[in-house]
Amino acid sequence: MIWIFPALAGILIVYFATRSSRFRRFAEPVLSLMVAGGLIIAFIIWINEGGNSPNTESNPNRQQTQPALTPQDISVEGLAFTRNQPDTSYRATGTAVNKSSFNLDYFKLSVTLDDCPDNQCRTLGEDTALILARIPAGQSQSFETFFTFPNRYGVEPTAPKWSYQITEVRGRLP
């Protein structure tokens, strides 16, 4: 409610500044100094409040806010890649399985594309996708995402080999 007073004062100053040129000459430097002072005070308050935040290590009784899900709690089954438009983009479909006792919110899937003609592989690219999958504990859900790999060599892969891993998961208690 304290904001009403500065707002009312600002409206009055603007009103009088539009009506009187003498008031306008006086009001401009005063308002500039007041705004500068207000910004300095806001900065000082911001610095002081940031320094008073409690140290997380000093409070051992604090409960964990996020469940301890690990990438091993999530598995991806039936991951298939199909070429998309443009040619460096691939559509990936699969099923995510939540093997934990927590509800899954999302996970990150990192994929590497190798070209392996005659069993001599060269890496063409890597990409990571954020998969928003709200999967309850012990259940599965299909997903679809897209990966883009730069075509550095100008040649399409003749024997593509895909490798993937789940790099990050986030969940919550049921």
Image (cartoon, rainbow, N blue to C red):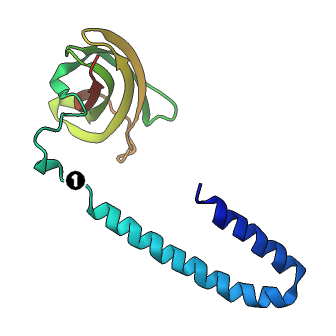
Quadrant of res 4 = bottom right
As drawn, is 6 to the left or to the right of 161? right
Between 42 and 173, the one lying in front of the other is 42
As drawn, is 146 to the left or to the right of 19? left
Q: Look at the numbered disc 1 and give the secondary structure of its residue.
A: loop
Q: Is residue 119 visible?
A: yes
Between 38 and 90, the one lying in front of the other is 38
Which residue is outermost to the right? 19
Tell me where residue 138 appears, x and y as whole percent.
24, 9
Between 71 and 35, the one lying in front of the other is 35
Tell me where residue 11 appears, x and y as whole percent.
76, 67
Query: Residue at left 33%, top 67%?
Result: 48
As drawn, is 42 to the left or to the right of 80? right
Quadrant of res 67 = top left
The amino acid marked with disc number 1 is Pro
Tell me where residue 156 appears, x and y as whole percent.
38, 35
Whether residue 125 is situated above or below residue 41 in the rendered picture: above
Q: How many marks?
A: 1
Which residue is outermost to the top? 139
Whether residue 22 is situated above or below residue 2 in the rendered picture: below
Q: Is residue 160 visible?
A: no
Locate the C terminus and report the quarter of the image it occupies.
Answer: top left
Query: Residue at left 47%, top 77%?
Result: 40
Reading the image, the residue beneath label 1 is 54
Between 134 and 131, the one lying in front of the other is 134
Query: Residue at left 31%, top 13%?
Result: 136
Tell me where residue 66 appears, x and y as whole percent.
25, 32
For label 1, count other residues whose C-alpha is less than 10 Å away and answer few (under 14), some (14-19) or many (20+).
few
